[in-house]
Amino acid sequence: MSCQYDWKSYALGEMDRSARREAEAHANACPACREELASTRLTLDALSTLREEEIPRRIAFVSDQIFEPRWYQRAFRSLWSPNFAAACVVAGAILFHAFRGTPDQAVVNAQIDAAVSKAVAVEDARYAEQFERLASQVNARSEVFTRTVNREVRQ
C-alpha cells in the first residue's frame, strides 16, 4: 500500500478541512484505505468503551512483604515519634488534674480577694505618687506666675 494518509488523525478530527476533504475522496476511491479507516474507527470505539483507571505509581514486588517491618518494630518506632510524646504530655496533664483534686471555693475566693487588694494598693500608691508630682509642678508654676505678676504690678 503506497497511500500516505494519517487515518488516526482523520478519525480523531485533527485534520484541517482541505486535508480532510482530500482524505475522504481518497478513502472513497481506495478500498485498502477504507479498510484501514474502518479498522482505526473500530479501535477508537473499543478504546472509548474502556473505563479510565489511575496509573499505578509503583509496582509491588514479592520481596516488599519480606522487608516490611514487623508489628512490634512499627510499635517500637512509634514510641519515638513527636506525636506519641505529645499524647503522653496530654495524658499526664489529665491525670495530674484528675488526682490533684479541686480546691475549696472559700480558698479560691480568699486568694482572689488577696490578689485584688494587692493590685488596688499598688495602683493607689502609683496614683498618689503621680498626684504628688503633678501637685508640686502646679505649685512651682503658680509661684513663678505669682512672682511674674507681682513684678509686673510693681512696675
Image (cartoon, rainbow, N blue to C red):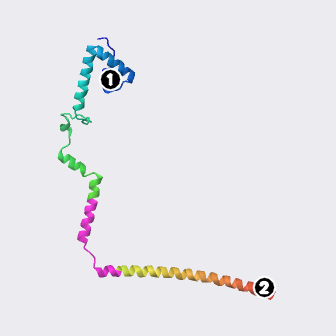
Q: Amino acid at mark 1?
A: Tyr
Where is residue 144 drawn, in percent x and y? 70, 83
Where is residue 153 drawn, in percent x and y? 78, 88
Bounds of the magenta segment: 88-110
Where is residue 70 drawn, in percent x and y? 18, 44
Q: Looking at the magenta stretch, what is its main secondary structure?
A: helix
- The C terminus lies in quadrant: bottom right
Residue at x 26% of width, y 14% of height: 32
Residue at x 60% of width, y 83% of height: 135
Q: Earlier in the sequence, mark 2 or mark 1?
A: 1
Report if residue 95 lies within the magenta region: yes
Q: Is residue 27 left or right of residue 74?
A: right
Q: Is residue 23 above or below residue 98?
A: above
> Furthest-top residue in view?
2
Report if residue 27 lies within the magenta region: no
**Numbered tag placed on residue 140 in the rendering:** none
Q: Which residue is mark 1?
A: 10
Q: Mark 2 to mark 1: distance in Å?
A: 113 Å
